[in-house]
Amino acid sequence: MFPRPWGPLRGSHPPALGRTMFRFHHLLLGCCAGLACTSSTISPRVLSDAQWLGFPEARVTLSAGGSKARGLHVADVDGDGVKDLVLVASQEEQVCIHQGVGRGGFAAPRCLAAGTTPMDVAVSDVNGDGRQDLLIVGHFSNALTVRLGAADGAFLAGIPYSLGNHSQQVRVADLDGDGHLDAITKNAGSAGFWNITSLKGRGDGSFGEAVPHSVTGLPRDLVVADVNDDALPDVLVLNTNSFTVDILLARKDEKLTAVPPLKLSGSADDEPFRLAPVEVNGDGKLDLVITHGLSDSGYLSLHLGDGKGGFTSTQSILANEPGEVVVADFNQDGRSDIAHAGMSGGVYLLLGAADGQLGAPMRVASSVTPTSLVAEDLDADGFPDLAWTTPDSVEVLLGSTTRGEP
């Protein structure tokens, strides 16, 4: 229970230039334990005398390699030590890779077949050979397709695994702690045929049969994070029509155990859209931030974790029609920040302040509506940058830094 709100409640009007803030502390970096973290991994600071100056107006626009681009990830695909961009071009049914050339630059996209109606891709080494592999889910293929990495950034032919449902998202994590990465997919077919599926990884790049798990509504977002501090990543499913977050706790016996879902307040005008784990109040327990950008104004809702897999809803904070959301320490001041995309366009940043608060949203880029958003150090200066997809492009916004006096 907090004695005062952390920011303006819905229906209030924040000052245009004021520092409307709410309490927000360090991101719990340990949430990546057991996960195949790629684009959500925040690089450590490497330039001790560098200073972050913010995000400039100028950015780089890249061809996505196709249309209906989505599912952007960051990974070193070809093993050259430079980060690459990976995305899905749904219209052309391809996965496109922009090879990093250093200093935040990227080559023209190289695209490869992704199966029928691809919706999302995960990039992880699922067979332990030191090369990144691609896991692709297709909406109408009802399948997870695994393309194992080969030499020089090439990929072997895809191996399909039936999911039995229309799939839109895929995540990778070691759910049972056996050292092998497993796959989790979000599925939303017609007539209420909604669930998630888990596929046990065998460590050699192959997977077992998909095991279905029930959800309490129409799933909108899928997140994997350790919410009960047992060193096993758990599965969270944000459901849009039921205003719930399903919580499935991972166990070493390979089972996912559902606990009572988090019930969100709201109505049809402010359905939840995206979910991100974050450590809000400095108690070492993982919390959640959820975007609600489908209403007229939009807001972020915050939910404190109890460290056992339960959450308590707190205040809602006005934001600019938030959709896609990422959490990072952009200025490397030891405090977590939030960046979110606007459902009507633009990218916004909320910086953590010295008193443990978070500033009001600042627009850092104009853009048509982003379809995915990542935060990662793309130019190796030790500070996270931003990149996002639009339907036809990839936008790269590098933070501006300068070396300080020794």
Image: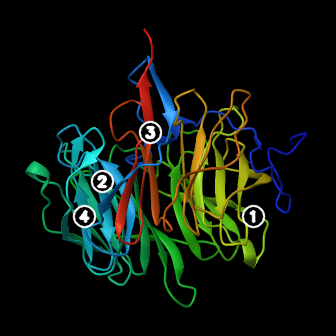
In the current view of this chain or complex, which residue is farthest to the right? 3
Mark pair 1, 4: CA separation: 37 Å
* Picture disc at residue 85: 2
Mark pair 3, 1: CA separation: 37 Å
Q: What sort of colour scheme is used for the picture? A: rainbow
Query: Which is nearer the eye, 150 or 181?
Result: 150
* Picture disc at residue 399: 3
Please, what secondary structure does the residue beneath circle 4 have? strand
Q: Residue at x 67, y 41 (%)?
A: 307
- In primary-sequence order, the first of circles 1 and 4 is 4
- In primary-sequence order, the first of circles 3 and 1 is 1
Quadrant of the snapshot with the N terminus: top right
Mark pair 1, 2: CA separation: 35 Å
Mark yes or no: residue 171 visible: yes
Crowding near pointer 4: few (<14 within 10 Å), some, many (20+)?
Answer: many
Q: Do the residues labelled 1 and 4 touch (CB within 8 Å)?
A: no
**Amino acid beneath label 2:** Leu
Please, what secondary structure does the residue beneath circle 3 have? loop
Q: Are marks 3 and 1 in contact (CB under 8 Å)?
A: no
**Amino acid beneath label 1:** Lys
Reading the image, the residue beneath label 4 is 96
**Amino acid beneath label 3:** Gly
Q: What count of labels does the image hold?
A: 4
Please, what secondary structure does the residue beneath circle 1 have? strand
Q: Position of residue 260 (x, y in %)?
A: 71, 61
Crowding near pointer 3: few (<14 within 10 Å), some, many (20+)?
Answer: many
Q: Which residue is drawn at 65% across and 57% down?
A: 290
